[in-house]
Amino acid sequence: MKIAQIAPLAESVPPRLYGGTERVVSYLSEELVRLGHDVTLFASGDSETSAKLVACSRRALRLDPSVKDPLAHLTLMLERVRSRAQEFDILHFHLEHLHFPLFRSVARKTVTTVHGRLDLPELPPLYREFSDMPLVSVSNAQRAPVPFANWVGTVHHGLAREVCPFNPAPRGGYFAFLGRVSPEKGLERAIEIARRAGARLRIAAKVDPADEEYFRSEIMPLVATPGVEFVGELTEAQKPAFLGNATALIFPIDWPEPFGLAMIEAMSCGTPVIAWPQGAVPEVIEHGRTGFVVDSIDAALAALERAPRLDRLAVRSRFEERFSAARMAQDYLSVYRALARRRAVAAA
C-alpha cells in the first residue's frame, strides 16, 4: 500500500528527547517499511526514517527558538499533504483534529489516530460535527467521553523489541518515574511513596514552560528529600539503562491517561509497573503479572515490596505478545484495508 504518515511537528520522528506521539509514528513507519509498504512521512526535517521523508519544518518546533508561530508550519504541512493526497491509498493523521475541515471531502481516504485526552468540554461538539472522519483510539478507555464518534478501531501502541532491551538483572537499586512534570502525572504521589518506603526514586521528566511554576513551587522542595534524584529529560539512548536498571516504574497518574507509553517501555526491559487505575492503565498492566494496579499509597507501598519478586522474563514476554511494533503495524493494516473496502462499496 502507499501510505502517508502525517506527524506533529513539535518533535522529530523519533524525538530526540520527550515525545510519545512522534515515537509511535516512528515505530509504525519503520515497521510498515519493513513489511514492504511504500511509506511517506510528513514530519520535521531533522527526523530519521526509512520512509520517504517530506520535511515540513527545518527541525522540531519545540527545539527551534526561532519559531514564533507553530501553526504556520502545520498549515503549510497540511497543504503539502492535500496537494499530494491522490498519490496515497491512505492518509494517516496523528494531529488530533487540526486537519478535519481541509480533508473532510476525502474523509474515507483518511484515518486519524487520536493520541490525546478526550474529556474536555469543547470536544463532543467537534466530534459530532465531524462524524464522517474515521478515528482510531489508542485504548478503549480513551473513547469514554465521546463514544458516539466515528471509531473504526482501537490500536494499542507498540514499540520495536530492540528499543528497550530486556534486562534480567537490574543493578540500580531504585524505583523510576518517567514522563512529564505536571499535576496530572502524579509526581508528588511518587515522591510520597518513596519517602514512606525509604526507597530511592530517580525522576526522568520533561518540564514544559506551562508547568515551570508548578515544578519550582511544588516539586523542587520535594526533590530535596533524601533518596530522591531529579535527572531531567532523557534522550532515547539513555532510556533503556534508566528503565532497565529500575526495580519498578511508578506510574501514579491522576488523569484519564489515553495510553501511557512509558509503561510498555518499562515492560520491554522486564521492569514491572506500579500504576493507578486511571484511563488505559487496566488495559495495559496485568495485575500481579506485569505489575500492580493500586488505588492508594498503602497499596503502592505493598506493591513496592512485591515488585522485586515478579518474573522479569514474564514481563518481557507479555510485552512481546501484546505491545510489539509488529503487532501494532498489523492492526493498523487491518484498519487501512477495512477503510479501503468501505470506499470500494461506496464507489459501487
Image (cartoon, rainbow, N blue to C red):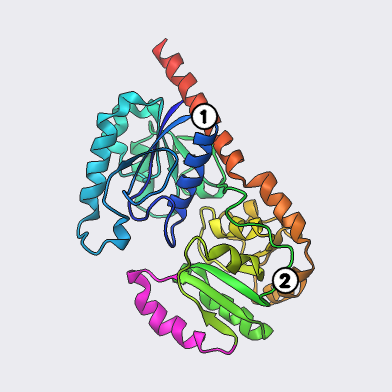
Q: Position of residue 204 (x, y in %)?
A: 51, 71
Q: Is residue 222 above or below residue 7?
A: below
Q: Is residue 30 left or right of residue 99?
A: right
Quadrant location of the C terminus in the rendered image: top left
Q: Is residue 182 above or below residue 9?
A: below
Q: Which stretch is magenta?
A: 206-226
Q: Amino acid at mark 2?
A: Ala
Q: Position of residue 335 (x, y in %)?
A: 52, 31
Which residue is disc 1 drawn over? 36
Residue 169 colored in magenta in the image:
no
Q: Going 29% across and 27% down the picture, which residue do you hit?
A: 105
Q: Is residue 232 left or right of residue 299?
A: left
Q: Amino acid at mark 1?
A: Gly
**Viewer-side residue, 58 vs 233:** 58
Please report whichever mark, 2 or 1, sits nearer to the chain's N-terminal start: 1
Q: Going 47% across and 70% down the picture, which residue do you hit?
A: 205
Q: Position of residue 41 (x, y in %)?
A: 38, 39
Q: Is residue 261 above or below residue 346?
A: below
Q: Main secondary structure of the magenta part?
A: helix
Q: Going 71% across and 74% down the picture, which residue do you hit?
A: 304
Number of numbered markers: 2
Q: Secondary structure at mark 2?
A: helix
* Residue 118 seen in this snapshot: no
* Residue 122 seen in this snapshot: yes
**Viewer-side residue, 153 vs 122:** 153
Q: Is residue 53 left or right of residue 152?
A: left
- The part of the image, by quadrant, that contains residue 213 is bottom left
Which residue is disc 2 drawn over? 303
